[in-house]
Amino acid sequence: MTGERGPTACALTGHRDLPAAFDREALRYELQQLIRAGVNTFFCGMARGFDYEALVSLVSLKERYPIRIVACPAYRGMVWRHPLSIRDRYLALQAACDEEDVRFEAYTYGCYHARDRLIVDRADMLFAYCLRNTGGTAYTVRYAMEQNKVLKFFGALSDVPEEFRLNC
């Protein structure tokens, strides 16, 4: 729902492959700024990469702020496809979420796009780490644009594909 000051529910989307120089502290800061602006609910797609890093920050921020985190994996058991090196940590992070919204019991063709639409539909805004105009992240950004959601991009705006920058 959109509050008096702005959006209160935020969907997260971003690339799975992050650069070595990905700034986790800047991500935490940006998420904290969203919280201070009134966002109190976050919908996380539970993918590797950006989703994982955002979830790490949000679970930490939850110790200081009254926020809700909704885990929205594309299908039940999706965590088992994560590398062993992060699986246990991911399970702990998932357990720290306040709610889980899973629409598919097993992997099904189209389940990732269905999850992407779900998180956008449940939110007022989309916080995205999007550096290219192809793939699932771009799909989610386009869907949010079609739904007239507020868009906020993580990172330098100059790195965001031009077709998306026009909507900021």
Image (tube, helix red, strand yellow):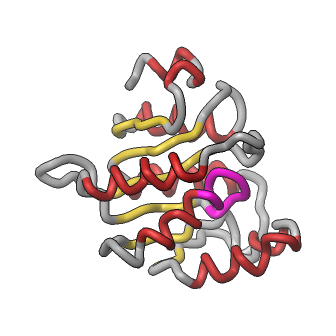
Magenta residue check for 109: no
- Residue shown at 27%/56% (left/top)? 36
Rendered view: 109 above or below 133: below
Question: Is residue 39 visible from the viewing direction of this image?
Answer: yes
Q: Which residue lies furthest to the right in this view?
A: 84
Kindly identify the residue that appears in the image at 82 percent across and 74 percent down.
80
Q: Position of residue 128 (x, y in %)?
A: 52, 41
**Which image quarter holds the C terminus?**
top left
Residue 1 visible? The answer is no
Q: In which quadrant is the N terminus drawn?
A: bottom left
> Left or right: where does residue 21 sit relative to residue 53?
right
Q: Please give left or right for residue 37 compared with residue 68 in the image.
A: left
Q: In this view, does 3 lie to the left or right of 53?
A: left
Which residues are drawn in magenta? 46-53
49 versus 138 height, above or below: below
Give the residue at the far left of this rendering.
4
Residue at 46% x, 44% y: name it.
127
The spot of residue 52 in percent (x, y) is 65, 61
Instruction: In the rendered view, tell whether residue 69 sits above or below residue 124.
Output: below
Rendered location of residue 17, percent (x, y): 77, 44
The residue positioned 69% from the left and 69% from the top of the image is 75
User: Which of the 4 quarters of the picture holds residue 90?
Assistant: bottom right
Tally of marks: 0
- Foreground: 143 or 66? 66
Question: x, y (%) of residue 91?
Answer: 69, 80
**In the image, is 37 to the left or to the right of 41?**
left
